[in-house]
Image (cartoon, rainbow, N blue to C red):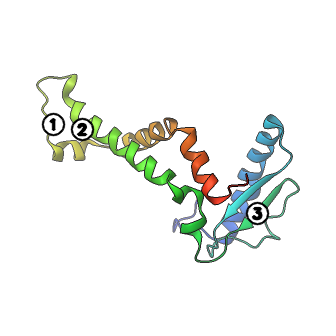
Amino acid sequence: MHQESAWMNSSLFSEWFHDCFVPEVKKNLKKLKPKKAILLMDNAPAHPDVETLKTENITCIFMPPNRTAILQPMDQGVIESMKRRYRKQLLSKLLFEGDEDEEAVCSTVQFGKALTLKDCVYMINEAWEFMPEHTLKQSWRKLAPYL
């Protein structure tokens, strides 16, 4: 889903929530057997109110204003871990780019010019695939030790 300006707005978010997010969560709830799900959100102006996002199995909880960096689990170490893994992928690609063709010595500038968005997306995906489960659990434990 998108719009020309690439900015999120309330109606686009609501459409995504009801047409994409809710059906996927319902599929996962059936498969994993929990009865309910929670969606934590910051207070971005593009997010509709709680009433608009009401569904039977999903509860939307808005975090307090100006607390996102403190409360958001992804800010509690996951993003930094992802960045480290991505940088490792990028450096590996830079250092071993010319291994298949011994004559092709790749300068940093040439490497940067040859790197595509698709390459970056694949590296991000691989970084996420190798994200240790304990990193995610540890981030949530800081936010909600009782879970």
Q: Residues within 10 Å of mark 2 (few under 14, many from 20)?
A: some
Q: Sequence order check: which comes first, mark 2 or mark 3?
A: 3
Q: Residue at x 72, y 71 (%)?
A: 48
Q: Residues within 10 Å of mark 3 (few under 14, many from 20)?
A: some
Give, as a three-letter code, the residue at label 2. Answer: Leu
Q: Residue at x 33, y 40 (%)?
A: 88
**Is residue 1 in sight in this rendering?**
no
Give, as a three-letter code, the residue at label 3. Answer: Cys
Are circles 2 and 3 on residues that touch, CB within 8 Å? no
Question: Label 1 vs label 3: CA separation?
Answer: 49 Å
Are circles 1 and 2 on residues that touch, CB within 8 Å? yes
Quarter of the view holding residue 73:
bottom right
Q: Residue at x 28, y 35 (%)?
A: 93
Q: Which residue is mark 2?
A: 94
Furthest-front residue in view? 145
Foreground residue among 45 and 29: 29
SS category of the residue bearing label 3: strand
Q: Which residue is mark 3?
A: 60
Q: Which residue is mark 1?
A: 106
Q: Nearer the viewer, mark 1 or mark 2?
A: 2
